[in-house]
Image: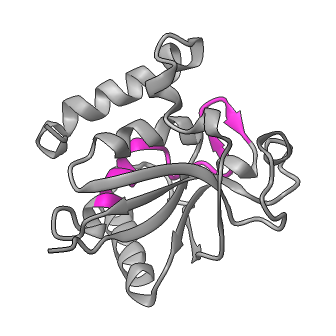
Amino acid sequence: METITEKITLGGGCFWCLDPIYSDLRGVKHVSVGYSGGRVPNPPYRLVCTGLTGHAEVVQVEFDPQEISLEDVLRVFFSIHDPTTLNRQGADVGTQYRSVIFYNSTEQKETAQRVRDEIELSKIWPTPIVTEIVPFVEFYPAEDYHQKYFEKNPDAGYCQIVIAPKVAKFRKSHLERLKL
């Protein structure tokens, strides 16, 4: 029996930080890092970093909705980055680091809005959520060296200082959701 998967494209700061978390999540079948939401076809990383392309750094998450719901994929999203800072995550500043959900269907849009409202009402974050919810248009995979960056470069400075603590915190607080 063939597994039917669903895709959602998410921007929450540096894609290197989101990739290992979603890769660890039970029900997620594949994660690819790349660029979405901009005006330039197939942009290179260096151009995206300028902010001139309009793209956000994103992860495209392919998941099995029989194993993990879109609601849970999005709840994880809202717990692993700060959705209240406009065009910024920590020291990373620019529109390429914005908080954004690119939906593929009316159902995904409604689910994203419902989960965002749920998180907003819960007051988990002390300031308003600024996460954009916009239609998906195109995904451009990032260069190969960006794919699975944390897995390939665990001893790199950025990985040790920024990514490893985020991954450890996620694993500790979501132990029941991790792949075995």
Q: How is the image coloured?
A: one colour
Determine the image quadrant of residue 49.
top right
From the viewer's perspective, is 83 left or right of 67? right
Quarter of the figure that contains the N terminus: bottom left
From the viewer's perspective, is 36 left or right of 128? right
Residue 10 spot, x, y in % from top left: 51, 58
In front of the other: 110 or 53: 53
In front of the other: 64 or 120: 64
Quarter of the figure that contains the C terminus: top left
Residue 148 spot, x, y in % from top left: 49, 35
| 179 in the magenta segment | no
In front of the other: 88 or 26: 26
**With respect to residue 82, does 70 lie above or below?**
below
Q: Provide the residue span drawn in magenta.
A: 73-93
Q: Residue at x 41, y 49 (%)?
A: 125
**With respect to residue 72, does 85 lie above or below?**
above
Residue 131 spot, x, y in % from top left: 54, 62
